[in-house]
């Protein structure tokens, strides 16, 4: 059975938000929850990588370099132990939140590589989107690019959302995201604000009508809008106006909405969105 994979990094409100959101998703989907902490190898090398064995000709510097290598290894060991403490606290919280079969996992590797290796058994990935200095924040862009799994980015607990905004552009990727929402039990019971940004033409109107019908047939209460303007500006405005709890989008492509998830515009939307984001591929 594929799992909900939630990345835990730190002890505080962001990790608590990730944990609570992951527990809700796990319970709603009845999917096992795996709480993951990755000790990034680039920042914390393994003992083998810091060893100076076999080095020739260091002379007087050898002692100093050896001390530095030992210090790096000790630092990595302490951070690894800190990670175990974080995971234990997260596991206890997830159990209290009613998560389905929660477990913990710790890896010492490149962050994105670890997620790529685990994506075969991942149904939904949950990441924290925090402040500029947040360790996970620097991984959001490469993670979204590298993984082909739904990714939920959050900086607050998302539990039983009442309304979500689905950004739709009529493309194949967007239609696939629409179908994923319709088929999944994750958001059943929540109202949907369906927003399409673009010119008001016969084709766009028909595409929006078809999307609205698909969601209505799946049991959603839908408010569909076709709006003009810059996609990112319109989406943020509508999130606030509709009091949505979640933004849902298809990831990657060539249209204006899908280009929001490429390059600097991704960072802009992640930063500006007042609510969590669910990116579907």
Image (cartoon, rainbow, N blue to C red):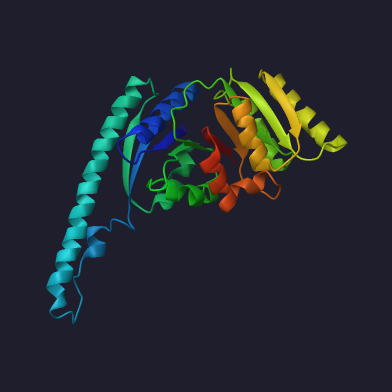
- Residue at 19 percent across and 80 percent down: it is 56
Give residue 114's position: percent from left, percent from top. Answer: 40, 49
Q: In this view, does 18 lie to the left or right of 201?
A: left
- Residue at 35 percent across and 32 percent down: it is 13
Give residue 3's position: percent from left, percent from top. Answer: 44, 33
Q: How many labels sit on residues? A: 0
Quadrant, the C terminus:
top right
Q: Quadrant of residue 216?
A: top right
Give residue 145's position: percent from left, percent from top. Answer: 54, 50
Q: In this view, does 201 lie to the left or right of 171?
A: right
Q: In this view, does 213 lie to the left or right of 245?
A: right
Q: Quadrant of residue 32?
A: top left
Reply above or below: 94 against 281: above
Residue 227 visible in image? yes
The front one of 270 and 7 is 270
- Residue at 61 percent across and 43 percent down: it is 251
The front one of 27 and 66 is 66
The front one of 119 and 44 is 44
């Amino acid at each position: 059975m594929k799992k909900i994979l939630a990345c835990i990094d730190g002890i505080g409100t962001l990790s608590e938000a990730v944990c609570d959101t992951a527990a809700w998703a796990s319970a709603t989907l009845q999917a096992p929850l795996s709480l993951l902490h990755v000790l990034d190898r680039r920042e914390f090398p393994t003992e083998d990588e810091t060893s100076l064995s076999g080095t020739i000709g260091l002379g007087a510097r050898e002692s100093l370099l050896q001390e530095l290598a030992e210090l790096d290894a000790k630092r990595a060991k302490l951070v690894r132990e800190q990670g175990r403490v974080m995971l234990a606290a997260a596991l206890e919280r997830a159990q209290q939140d009613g998560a389905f079969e929660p477990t913990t996992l710790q890896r010492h590797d490149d962050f994105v590589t670890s997620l790529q290796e685990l994506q075969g058994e991942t149904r939904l990935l949950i990441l924290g989107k925090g402040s500029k200095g947040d360790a996970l924040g620097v991984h959001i862009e490469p993670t979204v690019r590298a993984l082909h799994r739904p990714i939920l980015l959050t900086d607050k607990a998302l539990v039983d959302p009442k309304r979500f905004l689905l950004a739709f552009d009529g493309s194949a990727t967007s239609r696939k995201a629409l179908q994923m929402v319709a088929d999944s039990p994750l958001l059943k019971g929540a109202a949907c604000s369906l927003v399409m940004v673009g010119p008001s033409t016969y084709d766009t109107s028909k595409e929006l009508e078809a999307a609205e019908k698909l969601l209505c047939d799946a049991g959603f209460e839908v408010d569909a809008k076709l709006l003009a303007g810059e996609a990112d500006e319109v989406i943020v405005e509508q999130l606030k106006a509709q009091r949505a709890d979640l933004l849902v989008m298809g990831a990657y492509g060539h249209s204006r909405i899908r280009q929001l998830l490429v390059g600097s515009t991704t960072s802009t939307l992640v930063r500006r969105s007042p609510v969590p984001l669910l990116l579907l591929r």
